[in-house]
Amino acid sequence: MVAPALLWTLAFFVVPFAAMVMMSLAHMEGRDIVQGHDLGNYLKIFTDPSLRRGIFVSLEITVVVTLISVLLAWPLAWIIATRVPPRWRRIALLLAVLPFWTSYVVRSYSWALVLGEKGVVMNALVGLGLLAEPVQIMATRAATIIGFVHFFVMLLTLTIYSNLVQLSPNYARAAEDLGASRWQVIRLVILPLTLPGVMTGAFLTFVLCIGDYITPQILGGNNELSLPQLIMLQLGRRGDFPMASALSVVLMVIVTLAYAGCARWLKMERL
Amino acid sequence: MRILSWAYLLALFAFILLPVVTLVIFSFQDGRLPVPPFKGATLDWYREILTDRALMEALGNSLIVALLSSLVALVLGFLAASGLARVLLPGTVVMRGLLIAPMTVSYLIIALGLLQMFNKVGIRPSLLATGIGHVVINLPLCFAILYAAIGEHQKSALKAARDLGAKEWQVLWFVAAPMLTPGLAAAFFLAFTFSWDEFIIAFLLTRFDVTLPVEIWSMLRSGLSPATNAVGSLVFLVSVIVVVALELTLFRKGSK
């Protein structure tokens, strides 16, 4: 009974993946792909400034996004789980992740709308006299980061919230009885206990963020290219499948390293 | 602390809801640009998109692909989960790992691999190709949800049915499926949502018949327009209705 699913995974996941790794060892001659067994593409990725830059751009954006998202989501999840009256909790949570259910492309577009030179934010800031004239946010890294943080704050709020509500209130009560201040309870008791939820969410954020093409393309523009944008560029401009494949393998390796780095905190089965 | 909490809550809600609220408000814009000032309400943009043939075709394509690919993923995942839950063999861990593996790989990489393989064996970019890709990303999800839903109680019920002489299909149809209904429904709706919203696989694996996200993407190239707002708002409305319906029916009944 397991056979159909296994066959499907083999035929449409393992085989294409192997083909892609093979392809990454080929190279282009003119418009033709020449199969080979050399590491030329990989050498080029680490020597060509624009390609190497892409890896760092992606890593920088992803790390910053993951950190900001965790820092924003944790207090939000905590407030919803402990401060909001129980009967409003589910509604508050539903509201906090409502845009999660809009189309991903549309969500990036909405930010382009909000952050643009004539958008709501600039209008408000100039109108209130906080800015003399609109500042360019669109087509910069800031726009990409805002768009990403928006999405991942929602995702992390969900994972951290589900972690928080599973905690027995006795931990906090015991700490209080033993004389801990409210702040100490949060910092020394609750926070460490939510580490599995935080790490699972952070890992998901890392993986989804570093592999995403839509947000940097719509909001970040073409001034600096992330790894997925570079991959799409190789495909689009001259059908350089070998280079696109090599970049994908690099992306894959980065994700695997990230997984190895936080594997002991992850509880993937809970998802 | 209390005031601080509420201020934080409000600030974050504002941040989270700002783009969606802006999107919806300016879908009614009586003017060519979906930016302030708001010039008055009109439904013209909705009329325009609802009569846009390319858009409506893409909508239909998306529905078909999402429906069929989630059904296939659900059936494959259901069979695999019931099969693997039966006995613990040495190979079980490996098989489970293999079935879950696509979850940890970026959609872009899955799409690129499939594109190359389809090129080689001569399958043209099409809705079928996209559907195959969507099954690849949703199969791990369906499998994981259903596998987690089969606990000790379910296992012994399945074993009892087999011991009493039920054929394998009877075990699945009359025992496993009814017991796992909440899990099956959750897996199906999640898979449907992911496929419905998926962009990069559909973008690389379709050419003439595109899905809705790809069609919206091509609308973006002509810049900001209230028409795009209107499409986005409609998609949002549909998702909200589905989520609220799920919240009120499926998840309320203590199934978690």
Image: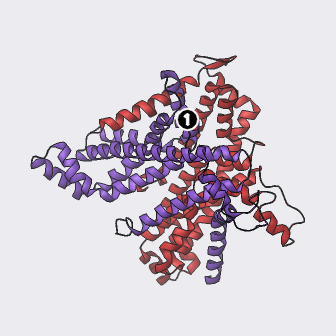
Q: Which chain is in purple here?
A: B
Q: Which chain is in red here?
A: A
In the picture shown, does residue B207 fall above or below A160?
above
Q: Nearer the viewer, residue A217 or A166?
A: A217
Left or right, A271 with reference to B165 = right
Residue at 68%, 49% in the rendered image:
A61
Number of callouts: 1
- Secondary element under disc 1, as helix, strand or loop, is loop
Q: Nearer the viewer, residue B159 or A195?
A: B159
Q: Is residue B118 visible?
A: yes
Residue at 49%, 75% in the rendered image:
A89
Left or right, A239 with reference to A102 = right
In the picture shown, does residue A15 fall above or below A264?
above
> Which kind of residue does numbered mark 1 sit on?
Thr
Identity of the residue furthest to the right in this view: A132
Q: Position of residue B148 (x, y in %)?
A: 34, 54
In the picture shown, does residue B180 fall above or below A8?
below
Residue at 44%, 79% in the rendered image:
A174
Q: Position of residue A255 (x, y in %)?
A: 56, 42
Q: Quadrant of the C terminus of chain A?
A: bottom left
Q: Is residue A146 visible?
A: no
Residue at 51%, 77% in the rendered image:
A82
Category of crowding for the residue at label 1, using alpha-carbon neighbours closer than 10 angstroms: few (below 14), some (14–19), many (at least 20)? many
In the picture shown, does residue A206 fall above or below B38?
above
Q: Position of residue A91 (x, y in %)?
A: 50, 73
Left or right, B235 with reference to A269 = right
**Residue under circle 1?**
B206
